[in-house]
Image (cartoon, rainbow, N blue to C red):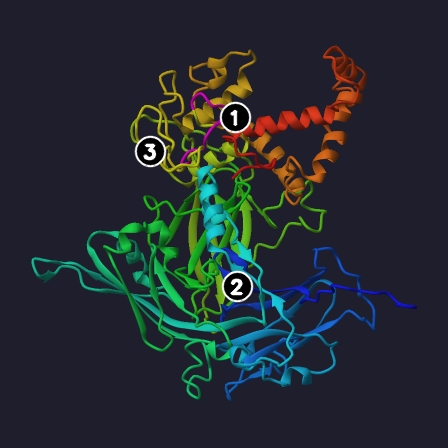
Amino acid sequence: MAGGVSITNLMLGPPNLKIQVKRAYQTAKGQQEHIVGYQGAGTTKDNAIEVKTLWLDRDGSPLPDCTGSDQCDMQMTGRLAVVNEFNSLTTVSGAGSSGNQISLFPIRPGAYTQLITLNGDALQPNHFYVQVSGESLTSDGFFNTTGSGADFGQRPKLYTPVRVPVFDEARYNQLRDAAAAIGQSPNDIPPAYRWPYRPDMGFSIADLTNQTLTIHYKQKDGKTVTPDVVVDLTVDDPNQAKLTSLFDNSVEYAKLTYNLDTCQYSSIDPNCNADISAFGSAPQQYIFALGGDEHQATLNSDGTVTFNHTDSLQKVTGSDLESLSLYMNSDPSNVLWQVEMPGLYVYYQAPTPLQMVEPDHTLSTKDEKVFRSLGGMRLMLNYLPQESEQVEKYEWSFQAVSGDAGRFKKSFKLCEDDTTSPDCALPPQQGAQVYWEPDQWKLHDPTNGDTYEGTLTLTLKNQPEPKTIHFEVRRRVLAPADSNPMEGQDVRMLEGVLWHLGISPQAGFPGMSGARINSSRDGSTTNWTKLCGSEAKADRRDVYTGHWNTSCQKGDVSLEGMVRRFQARNVVTVNDRTLNSGQVNIAGVDGVVDDTTLGNIDRIWMQYLKAYEKYKDQPYIGIDAPAMQSWLMNGPVAIWQNGYSTIVPATYTDTLHQQMLESMGLSPGWKTRADLIRAWKFQETKSQRSDRVRSFLLHEQ
């Protein structure tokens, strides 16, 4: 056509716009965040609800940036809508008590965050929707015209479809199984999501209160031997110690009583509290679970679910109490509530993920918990107050029975200078969550170990006297024993540290070729690791397993083997397989984690943590990743060509490489030195990972 452009086969589609809702909430681990899946939920106890938008081109490339432009042609409008008392959708009006609640917000190309704090009157059980209009931000009048049809209920007539996260259970389970097969904890795998198009992003706010658990014990000869125990799960109930009896054979069932509400207008519209199907969505189902046993929750007051011992309680142990939880069937990874008794919690990282340090129950008393720790491991201490406690001030202190009292840190992050760096300045010893470590890795008392006496003093509102909580952190010399092996959280820390340093516990398979304790290198459930000197399954990392000698069968594992291999690397100076394996006794290689071994761990572990801190946010480099070529040329090839400082001389130069090709009858430039290293690493990953080619990792969990 004259003066124009002829366009044929023009296909129009919805924008590549993702809407993500994230909830922030408080747990014993501190503040946590989690994505809310489509038709998922948050709770009235959440700290904040955050909405993020990501608008890209159809192929995933960035669109033109409109930042700072008053007149941006590429702009849409989002709104937060809620079910009102007339059972229709309306824009959330007003602001929360913090004044930063946003109901209408502009959507521009790129990634943006809108912080929506649903607090005060707005933080009520209800159904919310993030909806999008194709028009620029002016008013919400465009959203008020409804009539999209029966399938879309009260939605705007001309809505803009958006992409929303839908939990992908099949993919998530695949990732968890793969992690378990190589020794990772499946619980460390983040949820997997698909991003289909939907009319809007819907989610609910649920209110769960008055949770109590009644433990009913079996009768003997038709008579009640132990009376029922009722535990209030919302306060620091003295009966909480009885929760460990849940998993004894003496328990017949446990009954959970609760109030669960998801709609403040349920008295006006009885269907509102049941689901949001009136707005074109599938019915929501809230699930209470314990040990894999699931029960659908009823949305009313005085709801109850019962867990029988034969169905669920026998499947879990005392350390799995958190498996008593509430989630939605469509979004199971987003746990809305779980048993988390108020009190003191301790965690560590080696270097990731966050691991709970369980109290040593053989040493702890009702009034004082005792925690075991390894060397100078940094700990996070967190106090979770009961609902009736309004804490105005936290004060932490430590006193050592011998030696220094340790030191407080700002976070798990390592710093070269803790006094001058703003990110690493020493913090006040206050707050619900603090970080602390011993002053050195070596023991002050190498014979009897060390004890640090900790005190947390709470100043409570409307209470004349402070509340004081006493606890202890203990360190000891770890050593193997053929009978009655040592066990505890310090043993688990030791295993984690040595594994990250590349020490294998498996006989005949040193380094990365070895399988971790409690894992299956080939990915099967039948070929699990076995203990040295036994056919027993090696399924615990908190036990100092031994029998590491020349009679340990190839493929079997032992924590003693990890310690001895580590000691040998610091002692043996000759290339002798038996000596380097640590399977014979020589000076300094005995499996005892004494001050010498702790000192060597300190030296190498600190270097490892610094490298991890520097590179942890870098993307994994796969065989075919674009960054691989840059790494090859600027790393090993450059060292081959030019050497490194005065330490490494130039070796395999390009001249030598061309001579090698010529000697093989190959044309110059047939393969580069980078090609050689790439093929080398490709083969190496296959041999080390049972033919599963994977990215190169700085650390392994």
The first of marks 2 and 1 along the sequence is: 2
Front one among 228 and 503: 503
**Quarter occupied by residue 275:** bottom left
Amino acid type at circle 3 is: Lys
Q: Does residue 650 appear in the picture of this structure?
A: no
In percent of width and height, residue 550 lies at 38, 16
Q: Quadrant of residue 135?
A: bottom right
- In the rendered structure, the answer to whether residue 41 lies left or right of residue 610 reads left
The region drawn magenta spans 507-519
Where disc 3 sits, the SS reads loop
Percent position of residue 539, x then y: 36, 37
Q: Are marks 2 and 1 in contact (CB under 8 Å)?
A: no
Answer above or below: position of 451 versus 479.
below
Q: Report the residue marked by disc 3.
A: 537
List the residue tagged with mark 2.
Answer: 37
Q: Name the amino acid, label 1.
A: Gly
* Main secondary structure of the magenta stretch: loop
Q: Position of residue 666 (x, y in %)?
A: 75, 16
Residue 698 has which mark? none
**Disc 3 and disc 1: Cα gap in Å?**
21 Å
Quick one: quadrant of the N terminus?
bottom right
Compute the Cα span from label 2 to label 1: 40 Å
Real-space CA distance between mark 2 and mark 3, rounded to the nearest whole angstrom: 38 Å
Instruction: Give the residue type that dot 2 points to.
Output: Gly
Say the numbered circle drawn on residue 511.
1
Q: Extreme right residue here?
A: 3
In the displayed structure, 6 sits above or below 438; it is below
Q: Is residue 92 magenta?
A: no
User: Quadrant of residue 21 in the image?
Assistant: bottom right
